[in-house]
Amino acid sequence: VGAMALGTETIGRVDMLVGPGNAFVAEAKRQLYGRIGIDLFAGPTETLVIADDSVDGEICATDLLGQAEHGPTSPAVLLTNSLKLARDTMAEIERQLKILPTAEIAARAWADYGEVIVCDSYEEMVVEADRIASEHVQVMTRDPDYFLDNMRNYGALFLGPRTNVAYGDKVIGTNHTLPTKKAARYTGGLWVGKFIKTCTYQRVLTDEASAMIGEYCSRLCVLEGFYGHAEQANIRVRRYGGRNEA
């Protein structure tokens, strides 16, 4: 990261760095931001499983632990309207942690950052999911499209039990660089626009237009106490409008 950002004898300095990484990569990008552009500040991987009683605790637990193994600070949250599913999932997590090869990491994440939230309705689940604004949201309900149509804050949705976060991470091909730490409230993930600059230019085409704009500009600048700015406008009012603006 440092070599690409600063340049070496054999590596040219880049203008922008993008892509996911561990905590060390994220910190390097944070420190270099400004010297170079970056895609976003990424925190630990997050997963939210939204489920009802159309699925069972085994698949919910599997999907929660499958992301919790990323690291001991990775949040894994179950959001459901079924108390039975909530209990079954917690029991299944305890069972799977006894056999999962990465259980040491996943267990710490679940103990410190795991949550199970029981709601009364789909509507309440949407409100809670938008509050959490998770990076990954796995939806396993009878009507997953309801959440697609109504949720606003998330990095990526994975709809239906046939789909899961690991598919998105490794195979399907959708964007893997996604907002964390509730940043999904105001931004999406990496997209083509990140690689495009927007540059503007201005040109006033007539004397009359320049003089008219200058009058408004001068007044605003004086109100703000920017007299040098005002004089930029005034000189054009005098030259192009034939009026003595002072």
Image (tube, helix red, strand yellow):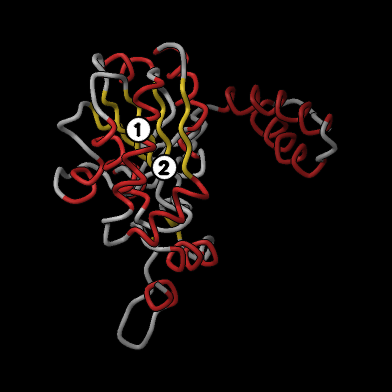
Asked if marks 2 and 1 touch (Cβ < 8 Å), the reply is: yes
Q: Position of residue 33 (x, y in %)?
A: 52, 61
Q: Name which residue lies at 45% across and 58% down.
A: 72
Would residue 134 appear left or right of 213 to someone viewing this image? left
Q: Could you classify mark 2 by the number of other residues whose Cα lies within 10 Å: few (under 14), some (14-19), or many (20 or more)? A: many
Would residue 221 appear left or right of 150 to someone viewing this image? right
* Residue 171 can be seen, yes or no: yes
Front in this rendered view, residue 106 or 236: 106
* Residue 42 can be seen, yes or no: no
Task: Please state which amino acid type lies under the numbered disc 1.
Answer: Val
Q: Could you classify mark 1 by the number of other residues whose Cα lies within 10 Å: few (under 14), some (14-19), or many (20 or more)? A: many
4 up-or-down from 16: above or below: below
Q: Position of residue 108 (x, y in %)?
A: 46, 56
Secondary structure of residue under mark 2 = strand
Task: Kindly give the residue lying farthest to the bottom in the view shown.
Answer: 9
Q: Position of residue 238 (x, y in %)?
A: 72, 32
Q: Which of disc 1 and disc 2 is earlier in sequence? A: 1
Quadrant of the image containing the N terminus: bottom left
Front in this rendered view, residue 125 or 94: 94
Label placed on residue 76: 2
- Return the residue at label 1: 49
Secondary structure of residue under mark 1 = strand
* Quadrant in the rendering for residue 209: top right
Task: Please state which amino acid type lies under the numbered disc 2.
Answer: Ala
Quadrant of the image containing the C terminus: top right
Q: Name which residue lies at 52% across and 50% down.
A: 112
Q: Position of residue 139 (x, y in %)?
A: 29, 27
Would residue 19 appear left or right of 241 to someone viewing this image? left
